[in-house]
Image: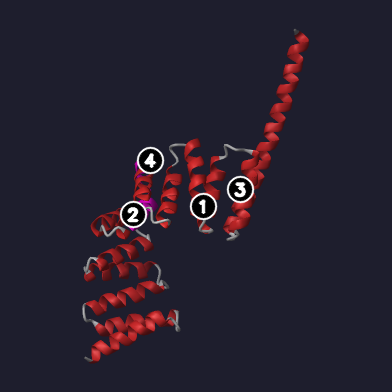
Amino acid sequence: MKKILTIFSFLSIIFSSCYQKNGNEAKSYFNAGKEDYKHGLWTMAIFDYTLALKEDSLYAEAYFNRGQAYIKETQYDSAITDFNHAIKINPKDGESFNYRGLAYYQLHKYDLALADYNTAIKIFPQYDIAYYNRGNCYREKGHYESAIADYSLAIKINSQYADAYLDRGFAYYANTDYKSAITDFDSTLKINPKKLITYLIRGDAYCAQKEYKLAIADYDSALKIAPLDTSVLKSRADALERMRK
């Protein structure tokens, strides 16, 4: 009996040692993937996360990070599969629901995306990115009031959220509320003065209000950032033509 117990203890030590080795290797591959991702090497990151998952098939964070890399590579179905794995391991992972929603959004599966954003927000009510993403989804569906409400919640949580101001401005613009749109574009440019699209769309909003001099000033600012942007040049020419008339 004593001999059997000794053999069992020996096997337990070997198993524990192998598990620790595999765990360390999985972590090393995972860290390499994070480093690749940080430098924009999405394919290499996917490769490293895959090696980590071969060592540890229950590594939820590796599935999540590989899913993000797949999104960068526009491999949205693969991303969804990885987020499915991460959620199966940890059903309370609000980030995986949010990013799976983003993958569905890119595939124009807006109802599935909305369901995931709703779950992410339920898990983490202060998740500004999920409100912003859900706002984008509502805007694509033409539900501008719902989109504006979500962008406003994102801004309430994070007052420096430039993209939330910008896209709320787009929603106001689409809803023909040009004054509110301009106010949001002003806020965007205070946070990020180099945001080219903001000058262009604010110029368009000024044109809609027949404030052509202000519109031309915005197009001029846009051209300082991108001198050969044909869309800006066309908008500026249109504003000049309207002003002459």
Residue 123 marker? 4
Locate residue 69 relative to residue 119 in the image: left or right: right
Residue 130 inside the magenta-drawn segment = yes
Check whether the beta carbons of the residues at disc 4 and disc 3 lie within 8 A of each other.
no
Write the residue at 40% across / 74% down: 196
| SS state under label 1 | helix
Locate residue 23 relative to residue 157 in the image: left or right: right
The residue under label 3 is: 49
Report x, y in % for residue 1.
75, 7
Q: Which residues are magenta?
A: 121-137
Residue 2 inside the magenta-drawn segment = no
| SS state under label 4 | helix
Q: Tell me how far mark 4 sits from mark 1, CA to CA.
A: 20 Å
Q: Earlier in the sequence, mark 1 or mark 3?
A: 3
Write the residue at 37% across / 60% down: 160
Report x, y in % for residue 169.
29, 66
The residue under label 2 is: 154
| SS state under label 3 | helix
Residue density around tag 1, few if under 14, some if 14–19, many if 20 or more, within 10 Å: many
The residue under label 1 is: 68
